[in-house]
Image (tube, grey):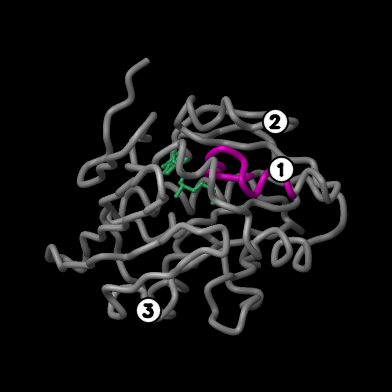
Amino acid sequence: MELNTRTGHKGTGPGAITPDGCAVEFYSRLPAGPEPDIITAAVPAGALVLELGSGVGRMTHPLLERGFRVTAVDESPEMLERVRGARTIRSPIEDLHLGETFDVVLLASFLVHSGDVRVRQGLLAACSRHVARDGCVLIQREGEDYHTNVPRERVDPSGFIVRVASSEPLGDGVNEVRAEYEFPDATWTQTFRARPLTTQQFEDALAEAGLEVDRYLTEDRTWVRAVPAP
Ligand SMILES: C[S@@+](CC[C@H](N)C(=O)[O-])C[C@H]1O[C@@H](n2cnc3c(N)ncnc32)[C@H](O)[C@@H]1O
């Protein structure tokens, strides 16, 4: 089935591109980073995890290796076919109604900053209806200077460049962001719409979904542990 591109999202470069503009080949090359350790420190050992927007399993695989049981959800079949060892479900997150709850629901990769408020509400509602009453939702937010410290770039130790080339206001609090990923043999770009959220706006969005912050997990407050509101 052909999937429609999400409005304002675009990707370029070799291989399949997801509706939100992500390149499958790029995410297959991207190392896991610190996220699996941050997650492991915040949840019970062996927890049942629902990972929303799993991509190729960059975080799924290290989480499985650490003994978590993971259900990986993504709307891109090309992403999901690279996930190994986890139950996979192909669906827009907003439409997910599994009728099950999980110890941990994971919403990483700044998806909560969707430019479309209805999509953001749909994502957080999906988190809320799939988290166990005594479970938690782990969310990755943008850093404070995400949209202001541009252009910026870093050279990954494995030798490629990640660049946030621009973030331009489109009106209504939404920015168009262009990211570029340069390897010696290939370049990918992603253009997407993101909505910066102050801490208050983020916490209000959680409250609207029946969630509240339990604690911020990292000093830069980009990783959050949220729980069902009483
Ligand atoms: C930036 S990639 C990150 C993938 C993975 N979390 C990682 O860190 O490697 C975002 C992924 O989320 C998926 N995605 C984005 N929005 C989605 C939505 N609303 N429903 C389902 N999948 C979505 C995309 O297809 C893509 O695979």
Q: Which of marks 1 and 2 is nearer the N terminus?
A: 1
| Tags 1 and 3 touching, CB below 8 Å | no
Q: Which of marks 2 and 3 is in front?
A: 2
Q: Left or right of 40: which side holds 229?
A: left
| Residue count near mark 3 (Cα–Cα under 10 Å), binned few <14, some 14–19, many ≥20 | few
Dot 1 corresponds to which residue?
A: 61
- How far apart marks 1 and 2 lie (CA) works out to 7 Å
| Residue count near mark 2 (Cα–Cα under 10 Å), binned few <14, some 14–19, many ≥20 | some
Image quadrant of residue 143? bottom left
Residue at image position (25%, 42%) is 10
The stretch of residues the image draws in magenta is 51-62
Magenta-span inclusion, residue 60:
yes
Across and down, in percent, residue 94 comes to 44, 40
Q: Does the residue labelled 2 lie within 8 Å of ligand 1?
A: no
Please state which amino acid type lies under the numbered disc 3: Thr
Q: Point out which mark residue 198 bears.
A: 3
Q: Point out which mark residue 84 bears.
A: 2
Across and down, in percent, residue 116 comes to 28, 52
Q: Which of 54 and 201 is in front in this view?
A: 54
Is 193 situated above or below 129? below
View extreme (left): residue: 171
Across and down, in percent, residue 117 comes to 30, 56
Is 2 situated above or below 222? above
